[in-house]
Image (spheres, rainbow, N blue to C red):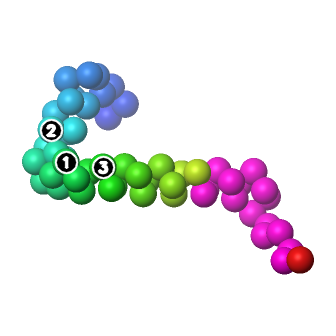
């Protein structure tokens, strides 16, 4: 039941988020989320190990 989100439901969630956070804050949240996902993918692809400092 929860896996069936269509376009109308997604637009409703986006509209509510826009009303709560405002356009500027919503953009900042999206940017932060994207950076977090990139960092997570980078850590996973590196095997979770940090490279030694030279």
Residue neighbourhood size for the residue with mark 2, other residues' Cα within 10 Å, grouped as few (<14), some (14–19), many (≥20): few
On screen, residue 32 versus residue 54, left or right, reads left
On screen, residue 38 versus residue 48, left or right, reads left
Q: Are marks 3 and 1 in contact (CB under 8 Å)?
A: yes
Residue 22, x across and y down, in percent:
15, 52
Q: Is residue 27 located in the magenta-colored stretch of the structure?
A: no
**Which dot marks residue 23?**
1
Asked whether 47 or 26 is in front, the reply is 26
Task: Answer with mark 2 or mark 1, whichever residue precedes in sequence.
Answer: 2
Identify the residue at the far left of this view: 19
Residue wearing tag 3? 27
On screen, residue 28 versus residue 34, left or right, reads left
Q: Is residue 24 visible?
A: yes
**Tag 3, which secondary structure?**
helix
Q: Quadrant of the C terminus?
A: bottom right
Q: Nearer the viewer, mark 2 or mark 3?
A: 3
On screen, residue 3 versus residue 7, left or right, reads right
What is the span of residues highlighted in magenta in the rendered image? Answer: 39-53
Q: CA distance from mark 2 to mark 3?
A: 13 Å
Residue wearing tag 2? 15
Q: Is residue 1 visible?
A: no
User: Disc count in the image?
Assistant: 3
Residue 20, x across and y down, in percent:
13, 53
Residue 48, x across and y down, in percent:
75, 63
Task: Answer with mark 2 or mark 3, whichever residue precedes in sequence.
Answer: 2
Q: For residue 4, which quarter of the picture?
A: top left
Q: Residue at x 28, y 22 (%)?
A: 6
């Amino acid at each position: 039941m929860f896996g069936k989100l269509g376009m109308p439901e997604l637009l409703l969630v986006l509209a509510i988020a826009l009303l709560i956070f405002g356009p500027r804050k919503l953009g900042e949240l999206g940017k932060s989320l994207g950076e977090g996902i990139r960092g997570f993918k980078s850590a996973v692809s590196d095997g979770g190990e940090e490279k030694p400092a030279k």
